[in-house]
Image (cartoon, rainbow, N blue to C red):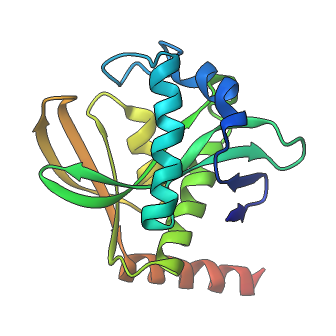
Amino acid sequence: MKIETERLILREFTVDDFDALYEILSDPETMQHYPAPFDREKTMGWITWNLDNYKTYGFGLWAVTLKNTGEFIGDCGITIQNIDGELLPEIGYHINKKFWRQGFAKEAARACRDWAFENTDYDKIYSYMKYTNIGSYSTAMANGMKKVKEYPDPKNEISYAYAISRTEWEKEKGQERSQDDKE
C-alpha cells in the first residue's frame, strides 16, 4: 500500500521505522494530549498494532515520509477506535514537531480521508481528540469534518469527535473538481 500526495508518501510501517517513530512518540510536547509519552516498548507495540491492523482491516496508521527526501516525519491513517462506546473508523496522526505548522498533517489526513471513502464502504469517517488539542480539531475542520460529539472520556477527561459523511465528501470533491476546471 502506498498513497502519494503533492509532498508526501504514506506507506506501511516496518520495524526499521522504530527510531524515527520513537523520537516522535517519546516527545513530551508532541504527546501532551496523551496520558504520557511512549517508552520504547510502547512504541514497538504501536508498530506491531499497526502491522496487525493491516492484516485484519487492510489499513492502519501508515508511515508518513517526505516525497523529495524519503525522511520519516510521522504517522497518519485509519484505525478502528472506541468513540463514546462505538467502534468507528478514525483518522489519526502524529507529525514530528520539527514539521508542525507546514500543512503536513492536513495533507496526510486528507489523503487518508479520500483513501477511506474510495476503498471502504464506511459512510462516515471520524477523528477524535482530547478537548485541549486545538491542532487536531483544526486539522479535522480543514478536511471538511464537523464536530458531532463532545463526551466524557476517562483517557482525555473530555473528548471531541469530528466526522465527515460520504455525501459531504462527495460534495466537497465535486466542488474541488469544478474549481480545477475553472483554472
Quadrant in the rendering for residue 155 = top left
The location of residue 29, given as percent across then percent down, is: 49, 15
Between residue 174 and residue 46, name the one nearer to us: 46
74 or 97, which is in the foreground? 74
Residue shown at the point (45%, 19%) measured from the top left: 38
Q: Quadrant of the C terminus?
A: bottom right
Query: How far across and how far down the image is residue 123, in percent?
Result: 32, 78
52 with respect to 155 (left or right): right
Q: Where's the N terminus, which quadrant?
A: bottom right
Viewer-proximal residue among 135 and 83: 83
Q: Is residue 13 left or right of residue 140?
A: right
Q: Residue furthest right?
A: 68
**Residue at figure coordinates x 52%, y 78% from the top left:** 119
The residue under the point 11% across, 42% down is: 151
Task: Please determine whether, in this image, residue 17 is positioned above or below residue 67.
Answer: above
Total tally of numbered discs in the picture: 0
Residue 34, horizontal then vertical, whole percent: 35, 24
Residue 181, compared with residue 30, is above or below; it is below
As drawn, 26 above or below 72: above
Residue in the image at 49% along x and 55% along y: 60
**Left or right side of 168 for 159:** left
Residue 16 in the image, given as x and y percentages of width and height: 73, 35
Determine whether, in the image, residue 81 is placed left or right of residue 135: left
